[in-house]
Amino acid sequence: MEEGTKSKKTVFVGGISDDTDETALYESFSTFGDILEVQIPPPATQHHQNPNPSAPKHRGFAFITYTSTLDAQDAIDNMDMNELKGRVLKVNLARPMKTAAANLTGNRAIWETEEWLQANVKPLAQSGGVQGRLASSKGGETEEGDKADEGEDGDDDAMEE
């Protein structure tokens, strides 16, 4: 099955209560057509820890995949803004997650882009760079590396005789 076809058969159900499970969703949404799958993503903290009894069992939304796009549309038309277990649901077509390849600069630092580097970074010779640090650590300022190239004892003419 193609990814685009599957997404048109999958509905997003938002606003479900903590006590709602797959069975309750299946029973409520199966009246609109044959359901292939019901998924309720667990909370992010539940993957590595033992959940405490008062912690939420899920993230408050679910995905329901139908066998046909018409059934999915019927579920959206009939269940959006309706109530289930005391909560008003938001039901619409599920959209695929944005992949890292599609959003290359989304989570990157601004200085990782070539445009920013070209506009803001000076060449090493102009910025003082390593030469500037060497001179300040040896106790003098550098002008074209004069003192930075001296020996440790300051005898800059020992080699020039």
Image (cartoon, rainbow, N blue to C red):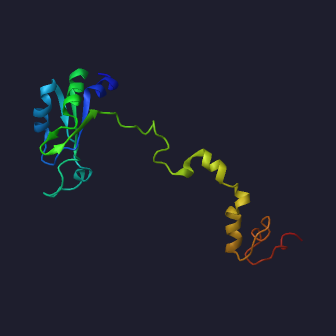
Q: Judge whether 49 appears above or below 25 on screen.
A: below
State which quadrant residue 100 falls in: top left
Where in the figure is residue 140, as x and y percent of width and height? 74, 75
Where in the figure is residue 73, as x and y percent of width and height? 24, 25
Where in the figure is residue 38, as x and y percent of width and height? 18, 34
State which quadrant residue 123 falls in: bottom right
Task: Identify which residue is drawn at 46% across, 45% down.
Answer: 106
Q: Nearer the viewer, residue 128 or 21?
A: 21
Left or right: residue 133 versus residue 9 is: right
Left or right: residue 12 versus residue 84 is: right
Left or right: residue 127 versus residue 40 is: right
Task: Identify which residue is drawn at 84% across, 70% down.
Answer: 159
Q: Nearer the viewer, residue 42 or 156?
A: 42
Left or right: residue 66 versus residue 93 is: left
State which quadrant residue 14 falls in: top left
Where in the figure is residue 54, as x and y percent of width and height? 14, 58
Give the quadrant of the C terminus.
Answer: bottom right
Q: Judge whether 21 appears above or below 75 on screen.
A: below
Q: Judge whether 54 appears above or below 23 on screen.
A: below
Q: How many marks?
A: 0
As drawn, the residue found furthest toward the right would be 161
Give the quadrant of the N terminus.
Answer: top left
Q: Nearer the viewer, residue 59 or 71?
A: 71
Task: Identify which residue is drawn at 17% across, 45% down.
Answer: 87
